[in-house]
Amino acid sequence: MKKILAAVLIVFFCSSLSFADDAIFKKIDKNRDGKISKKEYMEGVNKTFKSYDKNSSKSVTREELKTTVNVDVENTMTEADSDKDGTITQEEFVKSAEKRFKFFDKNNDGYIDKKEWDAELKRGNPNNPKASPIAPFFSISF
């Protein structure tokens, strides 16, 4: 019985991440053309950064990230804090997000289509299998 319950919970958890990530795709794709332009992507990134910057200091600390749902704090700091000073400036966050955009855009056409998006989500985040691979750059709340 415990194994069945565990399996059901795992399926539910994975499904909820998928729905959340689909909702994020739809939210970013402002013109509803089924693909995310770099402009749409970066607008979402900037909104997300502002939601993380709780004290409006133009930088995000480890403590601010800890209050954010579904963000792997250590992975985010490693990926985005390029000068390793313990804070992520908006410039650092944007540069890291631009690299992520290029990574998602497998065919280099300047857009992330649903197929590219889903492929990356399926691959997952090897550093934290429970975290969405699009975190920290997008929050469902923006």
Image: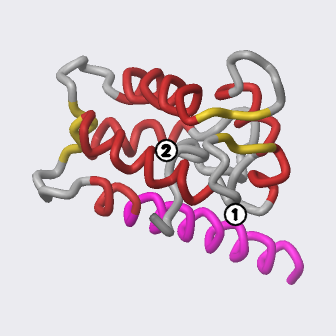
In front of the other: 35 or 14: 35
As displayed, is residue 18 above or below residue 123? below
Q: Residue at x 10, y 52 (%)?
A: 33
* Residue 7: x %, y % from top left: 73, 70
As displayed, is residue 138 above or below residue 6? above
Q: Amino acid at mark 1?
A: Val
Q: Are marks 1 and 2 in contact (CB under 8 Å)?
A: no
Q: Amino acid at mark 2?
A: Leu
Is residue 13 on the magenta stretch? yes
Q: Look at the image and give the residue range highlighted in magenta.
A: 1-23
* Residue 116: x %, y % from top left: 32, 36
Q: Which residue position is annotated with label 2?
A: 121
Alpha-carbon neighbours of circle 1 within 10 Å: few (<14), some, or many (≥20)? few
- Alpha carbon separation for disc pair 1 and 2: 18 Å
| Magenta-drawn stretch, dominant element (helix, strand or loop) | helix
As displayed, is residue 60 above or below residue 107? below
Q: Based on the displayed image, in which of its 4 quarters is residue 89 positioned?
A: top right
What secondary structure is marked by label 2?
helix
View extreme (right): residue: 2
What secondary structure is marked by label 1?
loop
Is residue 118 on the magenta stretch? no
* Residue 65: x %, y % from top left: 75, 51
Q: Which mark is residue 69?
A: 1
